[in-house]
Image (spheres, coloured by chain):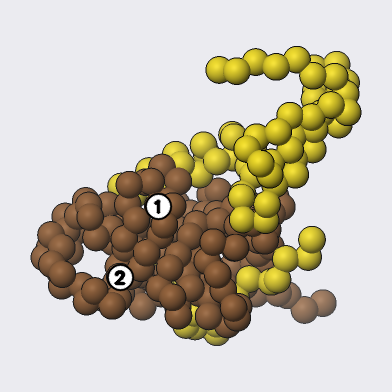
Chain colours: A yellow, B brown
Amino acid sequence: MLVLSRQRDESIMIGDNIVVTIVDIRGDKVRLGINAPAEIPVHRQEVYEAIQRENQRAARLEPGDTQGISRLAGRGNDGPARPPEPPRR
Amino acid sequence: MRVNTTRFGRIDVDAADVLHFPSGLPGLEDCREWALLADSDNDALGWLQSVSRGDVALAVVSPRRFVPDYQVRIPRSELAPLALDDMRQAQVVVVVGTSGTALTLNLKAPIVINLEARTGRQVVASGDLPLRHELSTKRQPLKQSA
C-alpha cells in the first residue's frame, strides 16, 4: 500500500480526475473531501461491505422461506415501483 | 438459453430477457447476467436468478407494496452507469432477506433496472435506511377513533 503524509488542505490525485483533500483533522477523526467524476460512486467501506454480506446471505434464501410474503403486501401500488426521485444534489 | 437452477429446475431464458449488470452485485460480483422470474405462489414476489450460476437467486419485491412511504434518494453517481434517459424506464426492486425470525427488505441498497436497455445496478441510497427492514407478520392495528 502506498502511504503518503498530508496536512490539512493538502490533496492527493488518483488518476487524472479524482482529487482527495484533507479538509479537517480533529483528534482521531479526519474529514476528507472527494472530487470525482459523476459516474464514479464513492462509499464508506463498511457500508459497501455490509451490502456484500447481506447479498450473500440473501442469496441463500429458498422459495420455502418466502411463503406467505404476499399476505404482508399492501393492496395498492401493484406493479413496478415508482421510479426514484431525481437527485437533489 | 437454458439455465439449470437449484431452486426452479431447468428454465429457459430468452436472450432478449436477460438483464445485464455490468458491475455484478456487491458480494456477487461475478454474476453479471440475471433473469427476473415471477414466483408462482406469491404474486408480490419475483426472483432475480443468476444466468451463470444456477445456485444463486435473490428474492425481490417492489418496495412500495410493503413500505408505502419508502422514499429513495439515489446519488447521481450511482445512476449514471444505467444511462436512464427517462426515470419512467426505471424499475426499482429490493432484495428480500431474513433476520432469522422474520423476512427483511434491504431498503439501503435497492436494485434499479433500466427496462429499456435491460441493464441493472444495485445502488446505495442516500440517508439512514436499514439493510434489514423487518416485515411485520402482525396486521397493523386499526386506528381507534376517539
B20 or A14: which is nearer to us?
A: A14
Residue B77, compared with residue A68, is above or below; it is above
Residue corresponding to mark 1: B24
Q: Earlier in the sequence, mark 1 or mark 2?
A: 2
Q: Looking at the picture, how far across and down is residue A85, in whole percent?
A: 69, 71
- State the residue at coordinates (86%, 31%): A23
Q: Quadrant of the N terminus of chain B?
A: bottom left
Q: Looking at the picture, how far across and down is residue A1, in whole percent?
A: 55, 17
Q: Looking at the picture, how far across and down is residue B6, in whole percent?
A: 16, 55
Subunit of mark 2? B
- State the residue at coordinates (38%, 46%): B29
Q: Residues at badges 1 and 2 in contact (C-beta under 8 Å)?
A: no
- State the residue at coordinates (75%, 44%): A35
Subunit of mark 1? B
Say which amino acid is labelled 1: Gly
| Numbered-mark total | 2
Dot 2 lies on which element? loop
| Classed neighbour count for the residue bearing mark 1: other residues with Cα under 10 Å, few (<14), some (14–19), many (≥20) | some
User: Marks 1/2: CA distance?
Assistant: 13 Å
Q: Is residue A56 visible?
A: yes
Q: Looking at the picture, how far across and down is residue B49, in whole percent?
A: 28, 61
Residue B71, compared with residue A9, is above or below; it is below
Q: Quadrant of residue A47?
A: top right
Q: Quadrant of the C terminus of chain B?
A: bottom right
Dot 1 lies on which element? loop
Residue B59 is left or right of residue A50, and the answer is left
- State the residue at coordinates (48%, 60%): B121
Say which amino acid is labelled 2: Val
Residue corresponding to mark 2: B18
B142 or B70: which is nearer to us?
A: B70
Residue A52 is left or right of residue B1, and the answer is right
Q: Quadrant of residue A76?
A: bottom right
